[in-house]
Image (spheres, rainbow, N blue to C red):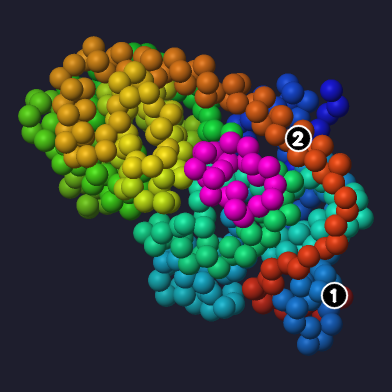
Amino acid sequence: MDELHVLVYGELADGVSDLYRFGQFQGALAHHRIVLQPWSALANYEVRLPAIPGLDVDEAIALGLGSIEQRALDWADVMVFRRWYSLGFCCTACDTLGADAAGLAAHGRATGHPLSTPQRHLPVLWRALLERRAAGRAPAIVYDTDDDLFAVPEWTGLRRRVGADLSWLQQVLAAADLVTVSTPVLATRLAARTGAPIRVIRNALEPAWYVRAGQADTKRIETTGAHTIADQGVRIAYHGVARRLRDYAVARPAVDRVAARVAGTRRVWIGAAGDPAVDHAVDESLPFVSDPVAFAAALVAARPDIGLAPLVDEPYNQARSELHWLEYSLAGAATVATRTAGPGPYDVIRDGVDGLLARTSQDWQHSLGRLAASAALRADLAGRARERVLAESTVTARAPEWAAAYRAAAARRRAAPTTRPTSQPAARQTIVPDPSGFSSV
């Protein structure tokens, strides 16, 4: 079997999705003769523009006057684009767009909010790919997502920023040789937006990041702010950022009722320590951990007996993955998750076998009451869930699916006729050309 080169635009481990969908598979894919590399490993993100007085840079990029280093494209058999990239200046805290760098910088100074700059390299790279495709020498294009970015709600704090770049995502979907998604719901929704085959490759975890339940220390007390991690009682855990209180509210009445009735119950939230609303809702609030490997250790250290996966039943949440169940299962907890009215992320759970599903408030109270009252039931559900995750949802188990997908995309591109370039999204940044001859941005 020939070696296949797969190039990912972006990085392999900058965020949770990067690592879960790409970075953690790098070593496992090598066993299938798939070489997975980020763009930065083979090229830089510099765009060079001619220094023409009065040149409108946005127009120059749209007309193809910019250039990039293309040796990475010479190397690649497959080029992967993932989720979403911002093509405009934006504030990540208040979900606003800026007209230019100076205006956004002023907003940042006034508010103290974190800012992000456009992916200036991306429109130029896209044009280069389309030109290569017209010449019959482009790598296959794969688009991957684990969220429905066409249904992002206001509460996420991403709606305006993502919405501004949906035209770019639609172009990628139209040009893709293959689309990979994390759930069947996403596959169904994207089918109307692409003519490419769609493969569902569910999320996976690396078991080595988690300590088997029972191996962690069982006698310890730590203080975190106003909350103390205790050692006795049933520990009911949830993880997420503070805005996920809207999802937690689905289960909260049942959780509070169990806490009031069962002595020693501890309500634990991982990921929002210091938020007043979260601190008020639980007994222990632990810090946000962005690195997935460190998060796995933090989840195990929190010693959950029961893991909560509540969701508001809405289109965006229906397309999410079963990642909470995977994580709780490897951390040794029995999961109670939302059963959505239609297809949803926790359909994978076999209700009563490797987890419990709840749709109504009565369901939540019944499920949590049963688990809180029976250590044997918790151990049985958690044990079966762990066995299943280890058999089906590890990096080793999923790597062959990714390898087959990349090879299928490359084969489809080789068999495809050449196509003429199509339009690309206009870059929304303002760049002043360097009078020395070229500007590098």
Q: Which residue corresponds to the image point at 82% horizontal and 44% vertical from the top-left?
A: 413
Query: Which quadrant would the N terminus be assigned to in this image?
Result: top right
Observer able to see residue 250? yes
Mark 2 vs mark 1, foreground winner is 2
Residue holding disc 1:
50
- Against 278, residue 116 (above or below) is below
For the view shown, which residue lies furthest in the right direction? 135
Q: How many labels does the image show?
A: 2
Image x and y of residue 181, in percent: 58, 41
Q: Residues within 10 Å of mark 2 (few under 14, many from 20)?
A: some
Res 287 quadrant in image: top left
> Which residue range is magenta in the image?
179-200
Q: Which residue corresponds to the image point at 76% horizontal and 35% vertical from the top-left?
A: 408
Observer able to see residue 132? no
Image x and y of residue 304, in percent: 29, 26
| Label disc, if present, on residue 408 of the rendered structure | 2
In 3D space, how far apart are the residues under numbered discs 2 and 1 (Cα atoms)?
39 Å
- Against 222, residue 146 (above or below) is below
Report the front residue among 66 and 202.
202
Image x and y of residue 299, in percent: 37, 30
Q: How crowded is mark 1: few (under 14 residues within 10 Å), some or many (20 or more)?
A: some
Give the amino acid at mark 2.
Ala
- Against 8, residue 172 (above or below) is below
Asked whether 61 falls inside the magenta stretch, the response is no
Sequence-wise, which precedes: disc 2 or disc 1?
1
Task: Identify the element where label 1 is drawn.
Answer: strand
Q: Which residue corresponds to the image point at 49% horizontal and 77% vertical from the top-left?
A: 106
